[in-house]
Image (tube, rainbow, N blue to C red):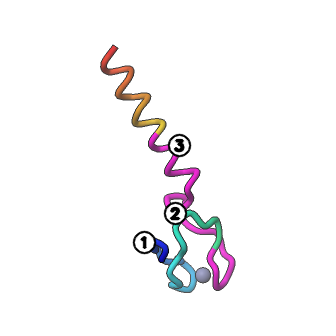
Amino acid sequence: MSVRVFRCPDCDHRLRFGADECGACFCPTPALNRGSAVFAGLCGVMLVMAVSLA
Ligand SMILES: [Zn+2]
């Protein structure tokens, strides 16, 4: 079972979490759906917290 949060903006297909492109029409998915973008966001939040605590 996989997590499917986002939908394709082009064809409304449910996107597999972390996928770079839609599984049905192969158009690019929203950046938020991509695992690397989520990882970068988490790193950014941690960096901000580290700076605010210093
Ligand atoms: Zn699609």
Q: Earlier in the sequence, mark 3 or mark 2?
A: 2
- What whole-number distance in Å separates the C-alpha atoms at marks 3 and 1? 18 Å
- What whole-number distance in Å separates the C-alpha atoms at marks 1 and 2? 8 Å
- What whole-number distance in Å separates the C-alpha atoms at marks 3 and 2? 12 Å
Residue under label 1, please give it: 5
Q: Are marks 3 and 1 in contact (CB under 8 Å)?
A: no
Look at label 3 and name its amino acid: Ala
- Please rate how many residues cluster around mark 2, counting C-alpha atoms within 10 Å: few if below 14, some from 14 to 19, many from 20: many
Where is residue 13 shown, x and y percent of the image? 53, 84
Where is residue 38 shown, x and y percent of the image? 49, 51
Q: Are marks 1 and 2 in contact (CB under 8 Å)?
A: yes
**Residue 14 sits inside the magenta stretch:** no
At x 52%, y 46%, the residue is: 39
Q: Earlier in the sequence, mark 3 or mark 1?
A: 1
At x 56%, y 63%, the residue is: 18
At x 38%, y 20%, the residue is: 51
Q: Residue furthest right?
A: 26
- Indicate whether 30 appears above or below 10: above
Residue under label 2, please give it: 33
Residue 31 disc label = none
- Indicate whether 39 appears above or below 3: above
Q: Earlier in the sequence, mark 1 or mark 2?
A: 1
Dot 3: element: helix
Number of disc labels = 3
Look at label 1 and name its amino acid: Val
Where is residue 46 shown, x and y percent of the image? 41, 32
